[in-house]
């Protein structure tokens, strides 16, 4: 039977369909999302959960005239499909294809670029205020998940929205999940709002019964109304939002297109900020995603029939994340004061097993990186040893807390930066390429990166003993698969490890050590003799080793999977300048200051010349150039 999806070239085409036809279209879209993500990987559960909700929004609103701002944006696949990108949807997250997040450069229907949580309310408020100042007339819609409201910036925005009270529609999608199950008081409150509908049903039924007996019923109703303000603080759904100056309606069933359209039409008539609360199921329509929402938040390619990954056994190779989690369990057995903290990423950072083993020593603070860092500071000043595991790109959100609350007080907090360097598939918002530059200049901090899982264990053990703030960064992906040493050992602070002898020095950091070794062996054939050192530390540097090679006529080359500007190479150049070794030839290899192309990690590394072949070509060219 022919479907409706082929006829949808833009949101206007949705308005030609009946509610029943929209429901059928939802099934087609859900099947397309499932098919595409099973091949390309992607954010499955969140997108399967908002198909009907997205269709209802585009039916009720007039995009791109009306502005829809997506929080995080990892639930925008249906939006992309119905806004003219259905035919290129097969290229989702692939090199040369479309992003898995909203992108203004892709479409006029993407009102705002996103990829990090909790930004939509502030951006939408700015758009609404600008609209009113320009005396324009259109709707601004902020689509926000309940997990995003745990972020501090979202609460700051709610405060300002309630103060300014512009015409603004907030669509709150409640599914009890961000990446991990939502935690905290907000999550409990939203659960209460959903269950609180029972109160409304009881109240309406009681009122109907009382009206049957007018002489008794109406006096009782008036008496109840006089008590309503005190009672509804405890019972009435949405009271917190109303107290903030934001009208609340809902919750509405998030998979009932007719009910959702009616709710949005009601919201459009309100002259002020209004929150439309919708309840959806993450992973709807695909049982494996319903049963295991964390696994299918960001899924690798998989077999639809079984739900099993299509990696030919590659998934059995441990990742750096899992190696970190195992090391944490080993260390926790010996160190009673070690605790772990994450920001809604217990599974992603490798701490899920630690949480099972030591639930009283594991803290998931929700999408609240700033709070996570300062919370760790409070633990550290009280004698505990907090390990804060956050993706590199997300720790950027807590820059001031790292500086003000940790580094200035020289507190022994260990930051574990997962997804450091090139990150595949998710585009520019998720690249962990800036952490070396934004951490290196902070006082008291130690910055490390392991070349393999064995070194990671020793770095983590050492970090907990240095007595200063420490950041340990590692990439997304499989570990090299080396044998582990027996016991933990402490790595001497600021000491590199020389792995290969040679005339000049190749000083490599973290996951650049292995391609540096491979490149150095190839360069020997061209008569270029390079010693290779595993830097291990970007701060403090092993200046003794550097200066040993920093002789007139010699060359020092650095390699890092991070931006060169302000990175480890910059630190080496500064050290050479301080020592007045101006006659040394120097080359810093790393990432340029640009937005990196969409693609797999190895594709991006090749494009940036960070694989072994790229290093060989770059170094040969450097040696061939005039001094």
Image (cartoon, rainbow, N blue to C red):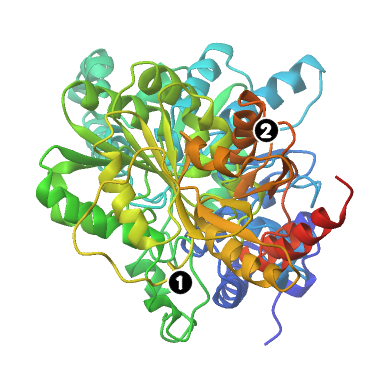
Instruction: From the top left corner, tell me how far across and down residue 384 is, in percent.
Output: 17, 31
Q: Considering the image in quadrants, where does the N terminus appear?
A: bottom right
Q: Is residue 554 above or below residue 139?
A: below
When the figure is inspected, residue 258 is found, relative to residue 545, above or below; the finding is below
On screen, residue 477 above or below 199: below
Q: Quadrant of the C terminus?
A: top right
Q: Nearer the viewer, residue 400 or 533?
A: 533
Residue 140 is labelled as 2
Q: Is residue 214 visible?
A: no
Label 2 crowd bin: few (<14), some (14–19), many (20+), radius 10 Å:
many
Q: Residue at x 32, y 43 (%)?
A: 194
SS at mark 1 in the image: loop
Residue under the image location 53 percent in, 25 percent down = 441
Q: Is residue 452 in sight in this rendering?
A: yes
From the viewer's perspective, tell me whether residue 136 is left or right of residue 600: right
What secondary structure is found at the residue carrying circle 2? strand
User: Dividing the picture into quarters, in which one does residue 613 lie?
Assistant: bottom right
Q: Are marks 2 and 1 in contact (CB under 8 Å)?
A: no
At which x and y percent is residue 499? Answer: 48, 60
- Give how far across and how far down residue 314 sits, in percent: 45, 80
Quick one: 147 or 527, which is closer to the camera? 527
Question: Which callout, 2 or 1, points at the residue further toward the start of the chain?
Answer: 2
Left or right side of 85 for 258: left
The image quarter in which residue 531 lies? bottom right
| 34 w.r.t. 183: above or below | below
Residue 285's disc number: 1
């Amino acid at each position: 039977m022919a479907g409706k999806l082929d006829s949808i070239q833009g949101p206007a085409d949705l308005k030609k369909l009946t509610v029943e036809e929209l429901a059928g279209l939802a099934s087609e879209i859900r099947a397309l999302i499932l098919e595409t993500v099973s091949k390309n990987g992607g954010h499955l559960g969140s997108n399967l959960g908002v198909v009907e909700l997205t269709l209802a929004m585009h039916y009720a609103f007039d995009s791109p005239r009306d502005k829809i701002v997506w929080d995080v944006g990892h639930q925008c696949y249906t939006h992309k499909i119905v806004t003219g990108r259905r035919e290129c949807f097969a290229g989702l997250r692939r090199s040369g294809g479309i992003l898995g997040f909203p992108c203004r450069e892709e479409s006029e229907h993407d009102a705002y670029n996103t990829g990090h949580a909790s930004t939509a309310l502030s951006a939408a408020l700015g758009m609404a205020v600008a609209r009113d100042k320009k005396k324009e007339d259109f709707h601004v819609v902020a689509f926000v998940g309940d997990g995003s409201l745990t972020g501090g910036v979202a609460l700051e925005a709610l405060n300002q929205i309630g103060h300014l009270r512009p015409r603004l529609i907030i669509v709150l999608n409640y599914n009890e999940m961000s990446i991990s199950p939502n935690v905290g008081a907000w999550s409990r409150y939203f659960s209460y709002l959903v269950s609180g509908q029972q109160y409304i049903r009881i109240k309406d039924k009681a009122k109907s019964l009382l009206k049957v007996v007018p002489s008794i019923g109406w006096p009782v109703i008036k008496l109840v109304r006089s008590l309503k303000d005190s009672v509804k603080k405890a019972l009435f759904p949405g009271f917190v939002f109303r107290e903030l100056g934001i009208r609340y309606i809902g919750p509405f069933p998030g998979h009932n297109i007719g009910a959702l359209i009616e709710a949005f039409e009601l919201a459009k008539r309100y002259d002020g900020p209004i929150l439309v609360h919708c309840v959806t199921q993450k992973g709807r329509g695909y049982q494996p995603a319903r049963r295991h929402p964390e696994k299918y938040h960001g899924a690798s390619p998989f077999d639809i029939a079984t739900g099993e990954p299509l990696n030919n056994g590659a998934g059995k190779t441990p990742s750096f994340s899992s190696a970190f989690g195992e090391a944490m369990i080993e260390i926790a057995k010996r160190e009673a004061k070690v605790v772990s903290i994450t920001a809604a990423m217990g599974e992603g950072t490798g701490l899920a097993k630690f949480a099972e083993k030591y639930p009283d020593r594991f803290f998931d603070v929700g999408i609240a990186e700033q709070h996570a860092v300062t919370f760790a500071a409070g633990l550290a000043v009280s004698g505990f040893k907090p390990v804060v595991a956050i993706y590199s790109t997300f720790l950027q959100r807590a820059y001031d807390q790292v500086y003000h609350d940790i580094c200035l007080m020289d507190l022994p907090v260990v930051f574990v930066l997962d997804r450091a360097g090139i990150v595949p598939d998710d585009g520019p918002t998720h690249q962990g390429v800036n952490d070396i530059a934004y951490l290196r200049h902070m006082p008291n901090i130690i910055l490390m990166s392991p070349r393999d899982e064995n070194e990671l264990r020793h770095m983590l053990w050492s970090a907990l003993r240095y007595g200063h703030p420490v950041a340990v960064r590692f990439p997304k992906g499989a570990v090299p698969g080396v044998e582990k040493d027996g016991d933990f050992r402490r790595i001497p602070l600021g000491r590199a490890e020389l792995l290969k002898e040679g005339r000049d020095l190749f000083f490599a950091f973290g996951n650049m050590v292995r391609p540096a070794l491979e490149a150095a062996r190839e360069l020997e054939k061209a008569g270029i003799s390079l010693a290779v050192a595993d830097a291990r530390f970007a701060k403090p540097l092993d200046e003794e080793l550097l200066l040993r090679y920093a002789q007139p006529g010699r060359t020092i080359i650095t390699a890092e999977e991070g931006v060169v500007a302000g990175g480890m190479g910059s630190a080496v150049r500064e050290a050479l300048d301080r020592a007045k070794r101006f006659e040394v030839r120097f080359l810093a290899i790393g990432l340029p200051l640009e937005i990196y192309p969409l693609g797999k990690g190895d594709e991006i590394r090749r494009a940036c010349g960070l694989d072994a072949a790229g290093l060989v070509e770059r170094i040969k060219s450097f040696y061939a150039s005039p001094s």
